[in-house]
């Protein structure tokens, strides 16, 4: 039986193979980005769909879950989805549900390592570094996991160094592609630089960010995304899978292609230390804004818009959105693609997921309504503290189930909770005013009583003095009478 250490060593070997295969792309091999994309597209079309699905199943059995999930997403989002039969669609969605369930139950550190490896293959060095660093710094990581994280970080730095040496040339090539209207190649090159984590000077940063922003604007206008990523399915093509390590099965050896000659001899560009905080904040806000638009489109069943916006959210959100947000976006991106292509089979696992969400939504609605009713009952008895606690519980319950509702329903229920909290605050303020008025009335009444008592005492004393004076007068003791007065 394979131990954790054995699996770690195997993963390290596979990662090294993937790293070695991807290094020439960073060095600028002949053919360029456009040629690589064309080759990937043609190889995906030539793949046996049934064989791909079988391979995905094997990856799941081998617990290579992130790799399997990525291949599923690419399979159902690409042109290959057009040829999926009803049975193949059923199999794919069964595998998608299984891999998502396994990822939720798997060791988070193992998933982080697999995501780091996948991000490294996709040249997303920022995300890969974040995932690997998280494992290396985790107190619960074992020796094998830390070793894999260290190896990944070493490979990331080697990739980054290779790109640093040709940075100026790569930026120039991406700008040239943009200027001639080859936006797919331009986006691929610009994303490579943007996701590298390299420090850029002001001119380089402006050149990259402005053109990426323009490409995204063009994508919004045309209603589709230029593919700027790595085609994972192309790695299963014979002669590629064995060299990359992406396909771990034994296959006949393929002829090695002639080695490509590097085109670059560019010198490193001195990088200044720009203020990254504002840039990172702006990118995070942009990613969150696009994700919110995508969620709104999904809630309104505008699947074409949702597919486009989730694609942009995933691209923009790497390193800026949480893993859960990225996972949800990728899942909905996959579902949107299949729904739009009409490949959703009847009785598919997605229907089960929808039923589960429906039950969860009903439970959340019941808990919300119960808490709201408790708050209103407490208001009737005048216990505003209890009423506020119940209303806050209702709001918390709603927020925890936010993803279960469409935007309109969620905002309506949230408005109900906020309105009730406002009513409670108003009622509590009225109680406070009434208490103050009552206290003031009681104080005024007490003061009046004290004044009346003092007045009676004075009147009584005066009456007694008058009686005493009269008595002295009757006795003709005028001297004492004058003393009394």
Image (cartoon, rainbow, N blue to C red):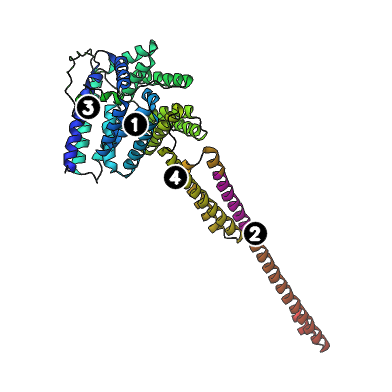
The crowding category of the residue bearing disc 4, from other C-alpha atoms within 10 Å (few below 14, some 14 to 19, many at least 20), is few
- Say left or right for 422 vs 256: right
Q: Secondary structure at mark 4?
A: helix
Q: Position of residue 193 (x, y in %)?
A: 31, 22
- Say left or right for 91 vs 442: left
What residue does disc 2 label? Answer: 434
Residue 404 or residue 241, whichever sits in front: 241
Mark positioned earlier in the residue sequence (2 or 3): 3
Residue 107 or residue 174, whichever sits in front: 107
Eye-nearest disc, 3 or 4: 4
Q: Secondary structure at mark 3?
A: helix
What residue does disc 3 label? Answer: 18
Residues rendered magenta in the picture: 413-433
Q: Position of residue 437 (x, y in %)?
A: 66, 60
The question of residue 429 being in magenta is answered with yes
The crowding category of the residue bearing disc 2, from other C-alpha atoms within 10 Å (few below 14, some 14 to 19, many at least 20), is few
Q: Residue at x 19, y 16 (%)?
A: 257
Distance Cα–Cα, label 4 vs label 1: 22 Å
What residue does disc 1 label? Answer: 72
- Say left or right for 112 vs 407: left
Mark positioned earlier in the residue sequence (2 or 4): 4
* Residue 395 in view here: no
């Amino acid at each position: 039986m394979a131990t954790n250490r054995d699996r770690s060593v195997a993963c390290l070997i596979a990662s090294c193979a993937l790293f070695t295969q991807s290094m020439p792309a960073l060095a600028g091999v002949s053919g360029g980005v456009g040629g690589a994309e064309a080759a990937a597209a043609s190889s995906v079309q030539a793949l046996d769909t049934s064989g791909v699905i079988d391979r995905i199943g094997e990856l799941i059995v081998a617990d290579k879950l992130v790799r399997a999930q990525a291949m599923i997403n690419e399979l159902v989002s690409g042109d290959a989805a057009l040829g999926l039969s009803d049975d193949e669609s059923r199999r794919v969605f069964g595998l998608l549900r299984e891999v998502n369930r396994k990822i939720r139950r798997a060791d988070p550190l193992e998933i982080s390592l697999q995501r780091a490896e996948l991000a490294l293959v996709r040249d997303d060095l920022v995300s890969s570094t974040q995932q690997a660093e998280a494992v290396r710094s985790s107190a619960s990581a074992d020796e094998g996991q830390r070793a894999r994280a260290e190896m990944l970080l070493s490979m990331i730095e080697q990739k980054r160094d290779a790109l640093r040496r040709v940075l100026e040339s790569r930026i120039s090539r991406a700008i040239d592609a943009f200027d001639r209207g080859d936006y797919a190649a331009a986006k691929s090159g610009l994303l490579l630089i943007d996701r590298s984590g390299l420090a850029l000077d002001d001119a380089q940063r402006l050149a990259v960010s402005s053109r990426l922003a323009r490409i995204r604007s063009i994508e919004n206008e045309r209603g589709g995304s230029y593919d700027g990523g790595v085609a994972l399915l192309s790695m299963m093509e014979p002669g590629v899978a064995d060299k990359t390590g992406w396909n771990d099965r034994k296959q006949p050896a393929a002829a090695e292609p002639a080695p490509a000659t590097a085109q670059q001899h560019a010198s490193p560009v001195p990088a200044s230390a720009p203020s990254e905080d504002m840039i990172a904040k702006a990118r995070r806000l942009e990613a969150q804004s696009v994700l919110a638009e995508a969620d709104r489109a999904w809630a309104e069943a505008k699947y074409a818009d949702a597919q486009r916006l989730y694609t942009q959210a995933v691209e923009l959100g790497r390193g800026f959105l949480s893993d859960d947000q990225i996972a949800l976006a990728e899942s909905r991106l996959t579902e949107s693609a299949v729904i739009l292509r009409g490949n959703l089979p009847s009785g598919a696992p997605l229907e089960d997921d929808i039923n589960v969400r429906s039950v969860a939504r009903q439970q959340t609605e019941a808990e919300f309504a119960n808490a709201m009713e408790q708050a209103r009952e407490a208001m009737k008895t005048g216990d505003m503290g209890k009423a506020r606690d119940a209303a806050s519980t209702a709001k918390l319950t709603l927020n925890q189930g936010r993803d279960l509702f469409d935007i309109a329903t969620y905002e309506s229920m949230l408005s109900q909770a906020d309105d009730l909290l406002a009513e409670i605050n108003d009622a509590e303020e009225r109680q406070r005013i009434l208490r103050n008025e009552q206290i003031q009335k009681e104080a005024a009444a007490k003061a009046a009583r004290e004044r009346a008592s003092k007045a009676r005492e004075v009147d009584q004393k005066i009456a007694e003095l008058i009686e005493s004076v009269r008595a002295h007068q009757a006795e003709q003791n005028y001297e004492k009478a004058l003393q009394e007065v």
